[in-house]
Image (cartoon, coloured by chain):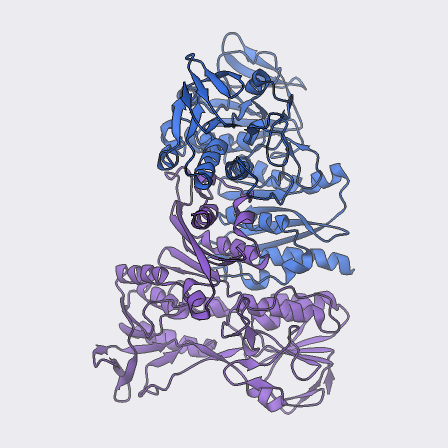
Chain colours: A purple, B blue
Amino acid sequence: MKKYDIIIVGGGPAGVSCGISAKNTYPDKKIALVRKETTPMIPCGIPYVFSTLKEVNDNILPDAPLAANKIEIITEEVVGRTDHKLLLADNSELEFEKLVLAVGSKAVMPPIEGADKEGVFLVRKDKDYLEEMKSKINKIQKVVILGGGYIGIEVADELLKGGKDVTVIEMMNTLLPTMDEEFGEKIKSIIEENGGKTITGKSVKRILGNKTVTGVELNDGVIINCDLVIVSCGYKPNLELAKNFGLVFEEGKGILVDDYLRTSDKDIFAIGDCAAKYDFFTGESSNIMLASTAMAEGRLVGTNLYSIKVIRKYQGVLGSFATKIGKTSFAVSGITEKRAKAHGLEYVVGVAKAIDRHPGKLPGASEVTIKLLFSTYSHHLLGAQIMGGDSVGELINMMSVMILNKMTDMDIDTLQIGTHPLLTASPVVYPVITATVDAIKKWYK
Amino acid sequence: MKKYDIIIVGGGPAGVSCGISAKNTYPDKKIALVRKETTPMIPCGIPYVFSTLKEVNDNILPDAPLAANKIEIITEEVVGRTDHKLLLADNSELEFEKLVLAVGSKAVMPPIEGADKEGVFLVRKDKDYLEEMKSKINKIQKVVILGGGYIGIEVADELLKGGKDVTVIEMMNTLLPTMDEEFGEKIKSIIEENGGKTITGKSVKRILGNKTVTGVELNDGVIINCDLVIVSCGYKPNLELAKNFGLVFEEGKGILVDDYLRTSDKDIFAIGDCAAKYDFFTGESSNIMLASTAMAEGRLVGTNLYSIKVIRKYQGVLGSFATKIGKTSFAVSGITEKRAKAHGLEYVVGVAKAIDRHPGKLPGASEVTIKLLFSTYSHHLLGAQIMGGDSVGELINMMSVMILNKMTDMDIDTLQIGTHPLLTASPVVYPVITATVDAIKKWYK
């Protein structure tokens, strides 16, 4: 039987970052990463295999960082455990001192009549499945996407780039419901300008066709014909191993862990999509599944496997993410107005628009819109939503750093921000500042 | 005699931001902004009038924000003061309660023999001067630029884009001496790849020619022929008014101010390039002149004119700036290795390189390099230097927010960073994190 000090189960971003972090902290420990997949996918790159990337193969999560850190890769399924031993599908056993479960999540198929027809696909993180899906898409024209969350709209955008006839159907009243309405409305208009159709506030009653999909029927009876249906209605944590291992978990939420991601077994940790999470502000259960969160957890656990070396400063999930639809980028971090209302948080909103070059005649200029929420009483920044050019991708990370540091309106107002004509908005209208000033003015009134 | 509550002297970014901030805080106060220029320039946009922008007129600092805030613009020179009255060049007087000096800085002409010849230009913030300079440049081919700081290299880059024969001469051993050598070397290679010449570690003994420039002679006797010389050897604070008004100032440093930018006269404030500054880390005098600093001061003073409403949290100048040479962006915030050595600060360096898209085959990908300095004992982030694609412009602002919040290596290691295939590096190699981990590994050794 092979013996390892540390075994990580799962080859996604959480597992990889945990392995690297463990090797950096404990260079003498023997580490193995056990995964089912020969070639794991970059999860957030998956929508781009349908048009921007030539082939699914272009989206493989590279093994080089694991090799460089002397982490052994074992490609096999874990099927059981007794004490400090893992049982693999090929009947071999692996011994461990510390075990990390990073087994991720799987796409959810909602209980819709006809979901089992040929031509109905989920957005799964599986190379062979994605290759089959891509080859089917290449042969047809009309696609219906169920779900207007970020994966749904990213796939829609890609299929439009590939010249397909695309309809996105979202149950909520706007697309990308994790952001406020005005951003969802903008996404709707971009998809429609690019030739797509969007239907919001309606659900799908059944998927039509005999053996193969021919359309979908909405709850109001309207029928939309199509050759293929892509279902993007969320993901749920993979809990089979936790169940099998006798760990405490909660269905739909994940494996229960403490602040240091320790499970009910002291030598077993759980990180990433399979681990239960709590919201940064409200402390309530959070179903956010993002590589950024998973990786932060992976690094924390990798460092703290044998003793707490890194003190965790934050309690929960911030939910920082960015996307790009057409030529416009969208990003959010922290609390939206929608969520503030739902949770009874009192807030003041500041908004600003600016051109992200100065003067605006310089090349590459786009308009950027920022919406900030501050806590009415403590004046802390609660959340940020941005749309604009490519710089939005790092702007939102600056906002996350501000939120994590509990910065207030006044802290932001006196910030020293670097600006440059070819790279950012003018310092006079730098939108993070002007949105903050907009909020301050509401307090002064 | 006209009476105002608040008068701001100077129409640059500091003055404008102060005016807007004052109006936001004290909406009932009557505010005037007095400036010499009919059409002030966007200071950091000036290098781009030589090629990227069609004309100098495209770089005018807009008056719209002043108009929108009902700030009266008075175009006249201030020539004197008695108590709470300003005397203007047209002999009229203006009464004020609170006065803000935002009179900026002027380009320095070093004492070089021949500096008075025709065809020798400074980079002045004056529209007519810049128009004359641009029209001269359009008629000639060979340009020597004295000074390889950020304005020198930005002008060099612009003139190369315009097809000129350009030589940059810098006294220090590398270009852009405000960053560490490796970044200066990269800038040198970009300028040379684009057909420019660079000479470092040498100074200019004299400017040659009869009435008009024909070349420059270096301190080692080498002669470089040229049709035009642009001198970009720094700026010094405008102190004439401070002298005239009897305020305390220090030659070369600026008008002396306290933490709230109050001068030796309790009703007079000084902000921006004309006010003395201190370094964020070392507390020593700083000669950094950046719009970002000026604006932060402007906002602080505008809010605090009648009472301290915003408590200042930082003491000094961070020196956060970005630039773009060729297709590569460069940025710095806080302490460089060079400065740490000069000031005896003990530090640990972390470096990382990554592609700013994931997978790297996605469009728009560039390599980004990050160098971080952490304090050896306190583990605080001391400084960041970055080169890469356009996202560097906002990445450096995230780093500034981290430095201002006194984040440590461990705080950064557990950060929740949002990433997206089309906008940022992969979470697995996100360079801010990996550079931090690189530093952490050096501690663990």
Q: Hey, which residue is sitting farthest left in the picture? A: A222
Mark count: 0
Quadrant in the rendering for residue A65: bottom right
Is residue A256 shown above or below A49?
A: below
Q: Quadrant of the N terminus of chain B?
A: top left
On the image, the x and y values in percent for residue B7 come to: 47, 27
Quadrant in the rendering for residue B31: top left
Observer-nearest residue: A115 or A315?
Answer: A315
Is residue A212 shown above or below A351?
A: below
From the viewer's perspective, tell me whether residue B341 is left or right of residue A121.
Answer: right
What residue is at 74 percent from the left and 75 percent from the top?
A: A30
From the viewer's perspective, tell me whether residue A91 is left or right of residue A383.
Answer: right
Q: Is residue A12 visible?
A: yes
On the image, the x and y values in percent for residue B263 come to: 60, 28
Quadrant in the rendering for residue B293: top right
What residue is at 28 percent from the left and 84 percent from the top?
A: A207
Q: Is residue B355 visible?
A: no
Observer-nearest residue: A340 or A196?
Answer: A340
On the image, the x and y values in percent for residue B439 come to: 70, 55
Is residue B25 shown above or below B33?
A: below
Q: Quadrant of the C terminus of chain B?
A: bottom right
On the image, the x and y values in percent for residue B400 come to: 59, 47
